[in-house]
Amino acid sequence: MAITKRPDARKAAAIDQFIGSAPDAAAPEPSDQVGPARAPGRRKKVTISLGIDPELLVRVDAAARASGISRNAALALGALHFIREFEDRCLGA
């Protein structure tokens, strides 16, 4: 496989302008996003700092590994279950 150089940004802009000026060029779609598109239903996550008992963390890691998910996903899932149970119990939702 050949190694290619990244195109010069000025050349890339000129190429985009040339292609965009073609009679059959589609109008560019407005986008507020910067970067790759996200899968539907996924939102940006917030990073937090969390203190947790080391023995509990070992159990969380084991359960996450057995479930085939990340530690972060396991903790987020646990938080979701906690909130749903709380809302059902206290708010009658």
Image: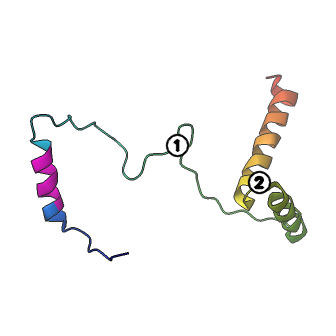
Tell me which corner region of the image, top left, top right, bottom left or bottom right, holds residue 43.
top right
Dot 1 or dot 2, earlier in sequence: 1
Q: Amino acid at mark 2?
A: Ala
Q: Secondary structure at mark 2?
A: helix
> Residue 4, position in %: x, y?
28, 74
Residue nearest the viewer, comparing 46 with 21: 21
Q: Is residue 3 above or below residue 17?
A: below
* Residue at image point 86% right, 67% down: 53
> Residues in magenta?
12-19
Q: Secondary structure at mark 1?
A: loop
Name above or below for residue 28 compared with residue 70.
above
Residue 33 % position (x, y): 37, 45
Which residue does the numbered mark 2 point to in the structure image? 74
Is residue 15 on the magenta stretch?
Answer: yes
Give amino acid for label 1.
Ala
Residue drawn at the location 14% of the way across and 47% of the way down: 19
- Describe residue 8's horizontal placement relative to residue 1 as left or right: left
